[in-house]
Amino acid sequence: MLGTPTRKPVDVPPPRPSDASSPRPSDAPPRGLAARIGAATPPGRDRAVDALRAIAILGVILGHWLVTAFVTTGDGQLRVTSPLAEMPAFAPVSWVLQTLAIFFLVGGYTAAKGFRPGEPYLPWVRRRTARLLRPVPVLLIAWVPAVAGLRWAGYTPDTLQALVKLVLSPLWFLGVYGALTALTPLAVALWNRLGLWGAVLPLAATAAIDLARFGPGGSDGAPAWLGQLGWATVITGWLVPFFLGVAWANGALATRRAALTLLGGGAAATALLIMYAGYPASMVGVPGAEISNLNPPTLAAVAFGVAQTGLALLLRRPLARLMTRPRVWAGVALANLSAMTVFLWHQTAMMAITVGAALTAGTLPGLHSRPDSPEWALDRLPWLPAFAAALAGAWALAHRFERAQPGGRAVRLTRGRNTHDDPRVHRAPKTIR
């Protein structure tokens, strides 16, 4: 047993100066922005949670920048492909950079920390989901003239459709994240009732749906509605790490043994499903592949997410120590304050460099060449700083819309009365189980 909600909480002693929650004496006094962010951070904030979210953001961004390729066609158009389609041996890259489960783990943690029984439900949901939606209109509005300009530059509707699809692809995450956030009261009630056994319910539902889709008779001659049923795993699959985040917020999964159990069990289950059940090795979608582990998420993706959860919990203490460094914490805090802006604009940043180079310089290696050899990966790496610079520019223009409030003032990491209302503000658990 990894833990149950019925055990008596054990108070954790107050942190010593050498603990992760306090700066180390060896650190130089912070100055400038790092000092201001440190002073604005509540003393009990669990900075490791923010670090995990930043890692998840970085993984998604690098993953998309490395597994999405644009190939110039003979007529000067752009075709979207992936090195995963050309080089199946590239699949291990997706094991490192597909970090969505960590997003949902942290989402469940922060939602459970911010949930107060008896609080009016609709205002609570509206407050927690508004932050997700604020940056979206800015992105969509910016792409209206962009599409017109690209059409004037000679790109066909097929090319424009492929580009716009990449722009809109991150929006599915916001919908699922918002839906799971709305289900937080149900997840908390399930935790109170069943403890960690509550994770078995969405896990079993995902397995049953996959069995109906891919089992005997599931793919050949199956009714059309069965294929649509698979999209239910968008909720049941990602509910597993989200629920584990709720459990974590309530004091479970605090031991190294629990984390190792999740890591080892999830990794073993993933390997068995790939080797013996026919699931793809790639943890992201591959153009042209018959089955995708991500669209919608399969049982293999869920098992992989369980392993990632275990790894994230193992990293919590080292990350907490690292976050005592003022400059490191300042970078992580800034990334979290505009996480949705960065997430929504990273594809646009990549396309700005790719399309701009195609229009001005023609076909360039690693940017418009076919990703069919290891040399392509080496050619791709030098372009990552250019993508990052474009993303920084987009962030500078758009990040203010993510934090804007009705009064025009930005939300900050402060000690405000209702800091639990901000999904980015949370405190370290006071109990372990």
Image: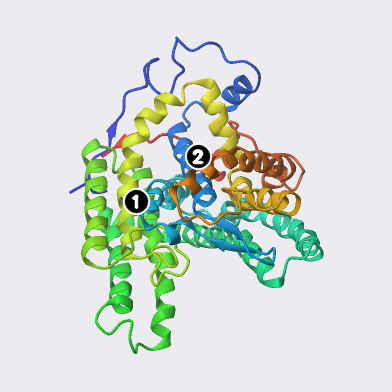
Q: At 56% from the left edge and 45% from the top edge, which residue is drawn?
A: 421
The residues tagged by marks 2 and 1 sit, at their Cα atoms, a distance apart of 19 Å
In the figure, is residue 334 to the left or right of 157?
left
Q: Secondary structure at mark 1?
A: helix
In the figure, is residue 84 to the left or right of 382?
left
Q: Nearer the viewer, residue 66 or 252?
A: 66
Residue lying furthest left in this view? 1
Residue at mark 2: 54
Q: Tell me if mark 2 has few (under 14), some (14-19) or many (20+) residues whose alpha carbon lies within 10 angstroms of its own.
A: many
Residue 61 x %, y %: 53, 47
Q: At 74% from the left edge and 54% from the top edge, which residue is drawn?
A: 359
State yes or no: discs 2 and 1 in contact (Cβ < 8 Å).
Answer: no
Residue lying furthest front in this view? 74
Mark 2 or 1, closer to the camera: 2
Give, as a three-letter code, the residue at label 2. Ala
- The quarter holding residue 153 reads bottom right
Q: Tell me if mark 1 has few (under 14), some (14-19) or many (20+) residues whose alpha carbon lies within 10 angstroms of its own.
A: many
Residue 101 x %, y %: 40, 52
Residue at mark 1: 244
The quarter of the image holding the C terminus is top left
- The quarter holding residue 285 reads bottom left
Give, as a three-letter code, the residue at label 1. Leu
Residue 33 x %, y %: 64, 23
Residue 245 x %, y %: 38, 48
- The quarter holding residue 142 reads bottom right
**Residue 418 seen in the current view:** no
**Residue 254 seen in the current view:** yes
Residue 145's tag is none
Which is nearer the N-term, disc 2 or disc 1? 2
* Above or below for 312 versus 133: above
Q: At 42% from the left edge and 63% from the top edge, which residue is drawn?
A: 294
